[in-house]
Amino acid sequence: MRFFNRTRRFDKYKQPLEDPLTGVANLFDASVVFIVSMMIALFMAYNVLDMIDPKSEMTITKKTADGKIEIITKKGKEIKAKKVTDKRLSGEGTRLGIAYQLKDGRVVYVPE
């Protein structure tokens, strides 16, 4: 009888223990869902989905840290990048209008 009671004391230790790594798999799945949702939100915020659409036309102005400006233009499937310089050009042509720079830095073109 003494041995029978002794085995009953240790019955609670014979139950299989829960694996501590099962929660890690759930955390990985949750982080993948979070990352994908953040990517979709960024695409929506910066209108990058228009870059994928073959029928869309868009223009993006980008300014680098050293102050250089780049204009990226997309028409259909064709993408062109132009760098703006401060060099003065000369030549012959016709006057199309006047450009004014506002106090906040924006440039407004007024056709004649």
Image: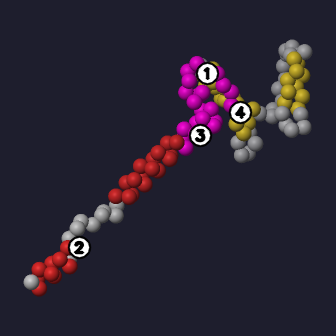
Task: Kindly identify which residue carries mark 1.
Answer: 56
Side of 103 relative to 57 (left or right): right
Tag 3: Cα neighbours inside 10 Å, few (<14), some, or many (≥20)?
Answer: few
- Of pointers 1 and 4, the one earlier in the residue sequence: 1
Residue contact at pointers 1 and 4, CB within 8 angstroms: no
Task: Locate the N terminus and report the quarter of the image it occupies.
Answer: bottom left
Give the answer, above or below, for where 101 lies relative to 7: above
Question: Between marks 2 and 3, how big is the CA–CA gap?
Answer: 51 Å
Name, please, the residue furthest toward the front.
1
Magenta stretch, residue numbers? 38-61
Question: Between marks 1 and 2, how big is the CA–CA gap?
Answer: 66 Å
Tag 1: Cα neighbours inside 10 Å, few (<14), some, or many (≥20)?
Answer: few
- Of pointers 2 and 3, the one earlier in the residue sequence: 2
Tell which tag, 2 or 3, sits nearer the viewer.
Answer: 2
Question: Between marks 3 and 4, how big is the CA–CA gap?
Answer: 18 Å
What's the residue at 23%, 68% (across, down)?
15
Task: Kindly identify which residue carries mark 4.
Answer: 61
Question: Between marks 1 and 3, how big is the CA–CA gap?
Answer: 19 Å
- Of pointers 1 and 3, the one earlier in the residue sequence: 3
What's the residue at 45%, 47% (across, down)?
32
- Of pointers 1 and 2, the one earlier in the residue sequence: 2
- Of pointers 4 and 2, the one earlier in the residue sequence: 2
Tell which tag, 1 or 4, sits nearer the viewer.
Answer: 1
Tag 4: Cα neighbours inside 10 Å, few (<14), some, or many (≥20)?
Answer: few
Task: Kindly identify which residue carries mark 3.
Answer: 42
Where does residue 25 sit, x and y in percent of width and height?
37, 54
What's under tag 3, amino acid-wise?
Answer: Leu
